[in-house]
Amino acid sequence: MSALFSFDVPAANPQLLVAAREALGLTQADVAERISALSGSPVKTTQGYVSRAEKGSLSVTGMRLEQFAQVLEMTPDLLTVDVKLWALGEGCLYHRNRRSTKASTLRRLHAQINLTRLYLTRLAHAADIALPVLAVSPTRVEGAVGPQTVAAQLRAQLGVPRGAIASATMIAEQLGALVVPMSLGGREVDATSLHPPGEPPVFVINTDAPIDRQRFTLMHEVGHCVSVPGPGVDAEEMAQAFAGEFLAPTAEIYPDLTAAPITPARLLQLKAKWRISAAAVLRRAADLAVISDSRYRTISAQTSALGWRTEEPEPLPAETPRMVPEIVRVAIRATGGLAEAAAAAGTTPARLTNLFGDAVTDATTHQDGR
């Protein structure tokens, strides 16, 4: 005889269990230990149990779901959502990092940007704000169409005036990107971007990097969104060439590069004019054959001896995104407060504040003072 009633019991999405754990930098053993502490049971939760839960070989429901949610700083309802999480190599997730970057660092970053995307989508819904769409169609880079061509076309399409870009952040947002400045705990990775089909790109930019590098990194990530590598074209080299041309077009910077000998002092002059790092100016000089490879190495060694690889003189002014902070502020006001907005996003107030600190502070200060 069939049952009179049938209930669908919400169960955790295994992918989200993994992403939430990796975003916090926890191991399976860490999660097991924390769940054991929460339960107060003499029977301890094991690392093997967490492993099976993440593989989907057992169902996490009820009290167990509540415990996982508390440990992973997510709401139970978000943990049960059926949603795709994107991985490197799927064509929409990129990162700008050093060759020495550890795999664990990249896994954590990929988890963070996937979850940030989910939080922002839910916050925008709570705020009744329509998320943007990418304002241009990607151009295929192959044959005579190089990344420099794409950069020139985009500057023309956006009506960018001659000279330096006033705000790389404004350009990214004008194209429909969600820019999220975030400390990534060091300089291993400068940024990562995620652009699932039909959704706005999400750019997480490392605020531990100098502003000039953040600007170049932003345009590097834009390059991934507006250009598609053809056969034999390296995606990272393509994005790098796009960023260099967009920020300092060949026809405009070449006269400056040839007007006086390239020295460390001259690099700083051009840094101030073009709002890119001295290192980027030097790279442009080499790429455009203004200086030889040996001269490039000599000047690189000089600037390195001056400590410029860590921090260059004459830092550029910071840039502030508008779109993401506005989504967060409106969501907090619309839901009635930080706790309510965090619940709508699917996380905790502390986590929301950690991700979007200034916007949260602005919104809560406004509420407290109204």
Image: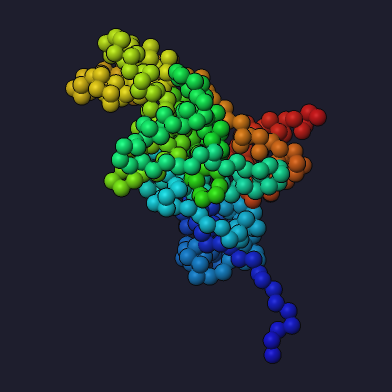
Q: Is residue 310 left or right of residue 130?
A: left
Inspect this view and state whether residue 158 appears. yes
Q: Is residue 168 left or right of residue 140?
A: right
Q: Nearer the viewer, residue 210 or 200?
A: 200
Q: Is residue 214 left or right of residue 250?
A: right
Q: Residue at x 46, y 36 (%)?
A: 222
- For this orientation, the residue located farthest to the top is 260
Q: How many numbered discs, if any?
A: 0
Q: Quadrant of residue 270?
A: top left
Q: Measuring from the top left, give residue 258's x and y in whole percent.
A: 29, 13
Q: Measuring from the top left, give residue 153's x and y in whole percent.
A: 44, 31
Inspect this view and state whether residue 187 appears. no
Look at the picture and state if 91 lies above or below 319.
below
Q: Residue at x 47, y 28 (%)?
A: 156
Look at the picture and state if 347 lies above or below 189.
below
Image quadrant where one finds the N terminus: bottom right
Q: Nearer the viewer, residue 234 or 295?
A: 234
Q: Nearer the viewer, residue 43 or 162?
A: 162
Q: Residue at x 51, y 49 (%)?
A: 196
Q: Measuring from the top left, give residue 206's x and y in whole percent.
A: 47, 34
- For this orientation, the residue located farthest to the bottom is 1
Q: Quadrant of residue 286?
A: top left
Q: Residue at x 38, y 12 (%)?
A: 269
Q: Is residue 124 left or right of residue 243?
A: right
Look at the picture and state if 113 lies above or below 187.
below
- For this orientation, the residue located farthest to the front is 144
Look at the picture and state if 344 lies above or below 184.
below
- For this orientation, the residue located farthest to the left is 294
Image quadrant where one finds the C terminus: top right
Rendered image coloring scheme:
rainbow
Q: Measuring from the top left, give residue 227's x and y in whole percent.
A: 41, 40
